[in-house]
């Protein structure tokens, strides 16, 4: 390959969508992915004889970027939509939290506290000046709106589950963006928000997407780990693979997490490296469990009990037809933690034992016979935490001619999900195409 065209480093949804947009505009594009399959955090795996998403994902009816992609791939008409239930687990009990009646009966809050909680969510759903929240901590903002009692009983346990003690330095944009997404459908005129899934899961979408990229002429390099990206003597950007081969390009787009970018691109200047170092990531340890029995019927069970060592329980079969799992039940048990947490080094067996024991405490009817399979997945760089006052410090264009950086840390007014990832990719591809027209 001659030194022209684009290289995309990273084959998750971000890299795939940039590659697609550039190829549709007539660009020569090569995409490099270290794994043998595309998808990144959206990729699938097998648990027992079921192939489904490695991490839990859901599509909202208002997720226009995802819906548009699915429509282009001929899949949106096959989406299945369902209204789901939510629960809270506290002090050994599960409380439903899906309807107005559930809210009124919710025992953890008094009447005034319930009013303040409802008012906070309503206010956040209508608030638009997100930049004003970047310099405000999520703790200060929620305490001011909801009161200390509501913060201590509801918000703090939820923030601890998602962010750990790092919630203290997280900006209010985090909770604002979360509420905004959940209210997007209502703000656009829908009376209720429904959750959706594609039969076959993301594995089916990714397989169709890969065929589309190949048909567009994208040169896919799967199982090709990039070791180094640097400018050569011809002022081209040389992409050096772990195998030792080097391929020259005029433009390279790196979609890897910020800590990895610094290692891949040693010719970045000191300011750029410092900006990359400032990005604070949370990782995830997530168990997928295949069960013979349903648990609660709640798609999401939020845990506000610090004795339980994970964030929540995602009962996928409360959303997805259990027939997709051979008439069994698939759950996810996630735990978010700092990327340098020592728990990442724990064995799968150790984590599996801890998770199963906690599930049995939560659901007293659950026995070993109900648990058919448990697999542990882990990723150190999942969620770039929006810290107070850090907007716009991470560059996309760099001092190295032709090198562009774009990753989930560039999502500044949304939550990390497939819809925001695709929107970011489309925005960056539009900029790149406009620059070269």
Image: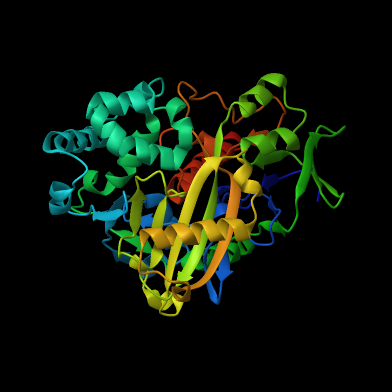
Q: Residue at x 56, y 74 (%)?
A: 48
Q: In the rendered picture of this protein, how many numbered marks are placed on residues? A: 0
Residue 229 in picture, x, y percent from top left: 77, 38
Horizontal side, residue 107 vs residue 225: left or right: left
Q: Residue at x 85, y 52 (%)?
A: 243
Residue 396 in picture, x, y percent from top left: 59, 31
Residue 344 in picture, x, y percent from top left: 62, 47
Residue 434 in picture, x, y percent from top left: 55, 37
Residue 173 position (above or below residue 87): above
Query: Residue 189 or 361: which is nearer the viewer?
Result: 361
Residue 221 position (above or below residue 379): below
Q: Residue at x 50, y 57 (%)?
A: 355
Horizontal side, residue 177 vs residue 13: left or right: left
User: Could you tell me if residue 15 is visible in this image?
Assistant: no
Q: Residue at x 55, y 60 (%)?
A: 353
Query: Residue 74 or 340: which is nearer the viewer?
Result: 340
**Colouring scheme applied when the structure was drawn:** rainbow
**Residue 170 falls in image quadrant:** top left
Q: Quadrant of the C terminus?
A: top right
Residue 380 position (above or below residue 211): above
Query: Residue 235 or 287: which is nearer the viewer?
Result: 287
User: Could you tell me if residue 419 is visible in this image?
Assistant: yes
Residue 177 position (above or below residue 88): above
């Amino acid at each position: 390959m001659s030194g022209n065209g684009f290289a995309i480093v990273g084959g998750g949804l971000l890299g795939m969508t940039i590659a697609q947009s550039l190829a549709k505009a007539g660009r020569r594009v090569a995409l490099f992915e270290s794994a043998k399959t595309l998808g990144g955090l959206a990729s699938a795996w097998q648990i027992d004889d079921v192939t489904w998403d490695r991490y839990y994902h859901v599509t909202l009816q208002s997720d226009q970027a995802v819906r548009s992609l699915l429509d282009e791939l001929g899949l949106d008409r096959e989406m299945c939509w369902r209204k789901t239930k939510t629960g809270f687990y506290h002090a050994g009990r599960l409380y439903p939290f899906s309807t107005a009646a559930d809210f009124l009966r919710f025992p953890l809050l008094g009447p005034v506290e319930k009013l303040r909680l409802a008012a906070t969510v309503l206010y956040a759903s209508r608030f638009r000046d997100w930049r004003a929240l970047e310099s405000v901590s999520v703790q200060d903002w929620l305490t001011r709106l909801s009161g200390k009692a509501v913060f201590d009983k509801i918000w703090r346990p939820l923030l601890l589950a998602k962010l750990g003690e790092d919630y203290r330095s997280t900006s209010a944009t985090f909770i604002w963006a979360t509420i905004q997404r959940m209210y997007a459908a209502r703000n656009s005129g829908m009376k209720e928000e429904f959750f959706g899934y594609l039969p076959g899961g993301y594995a089916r979408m990714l397989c169709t997407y890969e065929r589309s990229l190949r048909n567009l002429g994208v040169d896919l390099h799967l199982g090709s780990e990039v070791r180094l990206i640097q400018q050569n003597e011809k002022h081209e950007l040389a992409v050096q693979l772990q195998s030792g081969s080097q391929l020259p390009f005029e433009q390279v787009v790196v979609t890897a997490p910020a800590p990895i970018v610094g290692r891949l691109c040693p010719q970045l200047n000191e300011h750029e490296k410092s900006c990359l170092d400032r990005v604070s990531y949370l990782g995830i340890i997530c168990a997928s469990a295949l069960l013979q029995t349903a648990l609660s019927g709640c798609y999401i069970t939020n845990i506000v009990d610090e004795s339980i060592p994970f964030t929540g329980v995602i009962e996928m079969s409360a959303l997805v037809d259990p027939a997709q799992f051979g008439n069994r039940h698939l759950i996810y048990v996630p735990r978010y933690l700092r990327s340098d947490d020592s728990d990442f080094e724990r064995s799968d067996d150790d984590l599996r034992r801890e998770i199963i024991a906690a599930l049995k405490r939560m659901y007293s009817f659950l026995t070993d016979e109900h648990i058919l399979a448990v697999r542990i997945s882990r990723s150190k760089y999942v969620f770039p935490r929006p810290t107070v006052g850090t907007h716009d410090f991470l560059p996309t264009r760099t001092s190295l001619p032709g090198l562009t950086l774009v990753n989930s840390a560039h999502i500044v007014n949304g939550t990390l999900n497939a819809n925001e990832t695709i929107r970011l990719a489309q925005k960056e591809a539009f900029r790149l195409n406009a620059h070269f027209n």
